[in-house]
Image: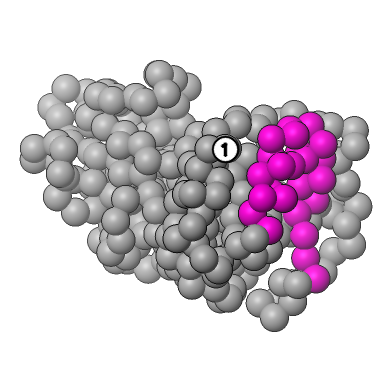
């Protein structure tokens, strides 16, 4: 679990403000082992962090309220960053300006929106000395989305429940190739689909057992989105491609000939090659966006 390392550093965009990293994650596997009575799916998954991130910039202001200075997706108060801030700040007495510097794709399975929300919770807790524990912030984050708590937890892990019960785990791999076909896959559509596998046997997966795992969403996503199906086939030349989350991004860990990726698949997907990390950039602040 993350400790008490300072998460903010001077902002490069907001004079007098600070910034904090909101990194991507990949799901090394995603098993759906059941469904609760309230409709939430029970998952077992392996989260691993990538040294590729959005940056969230903050500047306290004497004007009370939450002021989004730059909202790349135009979501306003529906933006998870705004909603996260509203969960922890008393808007009658606290004022903050927030600028979202977006680098991660939206709806790609990398957790961009959830990571932005998690970073907002952790950073505002630090900036305004709110005194919330890491566990309390995870509980708040879970109200915003099932992927938010892992970004607050901050270490690669085996997760279960709806994705909020963590056991720290060092997954293998040092580099990852991420291909983004720029296809927004609706998580809700996939998880509500009648053909989704929901009965994979529960099994505590360890780092040495990754070759026995899979992503239960992948075959369904490939059926619904032919372009993602073709992309996965094209990525076989680099190693073992897998969908992350519900997609549409696809990754290959420790790819061969990664320098050729742009030439081979650049016409069908944007390519990012980055380092894998056991610790989240939110708590290390030592990698480039």
Main secondary structure type of the part rendered in magenta: helix
SS assignment at label 1: loop
Does the magenta-highlighted stretch encompass residue 215? yes
Closest to the observer, 69 or 211: 211
Q: Write down the residue under mark 1.
A: 268
State how the image is colored. Answer: one colour
Does the magenta-highlighted stretch encompass residue 101? no
Say left or right for 155 vs 38: left
Q: Give coordinates of residue 173: x percent, y percent.
A: 54, 73
Say left or right for 130 vs 62: right
Q: What stretch is highlighted in magenta?
A: 212-236
Residue 60 visible in the shown view: yes
Q: Residue furthest left?
A: 16
Quarter where residue 64 is shown: top left
Q: How many marks?
A: 1
Q: Give coordinates of residue 228: x percent, y percent.
A: 69, 39
């Amino acid at each position: 679990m993350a400790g008490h390392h300072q998460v903010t550093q001077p902002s490069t965009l907001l004079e007098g403000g600070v910034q904090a990293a909101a990194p991507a994650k990949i799901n090394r596997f995603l098993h759906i082992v059941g469904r609760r009575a309230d409709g939430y799916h029970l998952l077992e998954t392996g989260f691993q962090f990538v040294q590729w991130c959005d940056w969230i910039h903050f500047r306290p202001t004497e004007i009370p309220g939450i002021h989004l200075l730059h909202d790349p997706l135009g979501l306003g108060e529906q933006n998870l960053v705004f909603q996260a801030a509203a969960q922890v700040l008393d808007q009658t007495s606290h004022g903050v300006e927030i600028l979202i510097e977006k680098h991660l794709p939206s709806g790609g399975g990398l957790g961009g929106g959830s990571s932005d929300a998690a970073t907002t919770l952790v950073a505002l807790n630090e900036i305004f000395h709110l005194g919330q524990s890491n566990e309390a912030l995870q509980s708040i984050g879970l109200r915003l989305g099932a992927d938010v708590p892992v970004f607050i937890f901050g270490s690669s892990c085996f997760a279960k429940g709806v994705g909020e019960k963590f056991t720290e785990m060092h997954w293998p791999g040092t580099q990852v190739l991420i291909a983004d076909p720029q296809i927004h896959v609706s998580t809700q559509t996939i998880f509500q689909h009648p053909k989704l596998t929901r009965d994979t046997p529960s099994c505590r997966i360890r780092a040495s057992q990754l070759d026995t795992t899979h992503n239960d969403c992948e075959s369904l996503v490939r059926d619904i989105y032919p372009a993602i199906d073709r992309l996965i086939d094209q990525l076989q030349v680099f190693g073992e491609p897998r969908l992350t989350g519900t997609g549409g991004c696809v990754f290959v860990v420790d790819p061969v000939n990664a320098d050729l990726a742009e030439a081979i698949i650049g016409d069908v997907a944007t390519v990012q090659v980055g380092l894998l990390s056991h610790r989240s950039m939110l708590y290390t602040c030592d990698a480039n966006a």
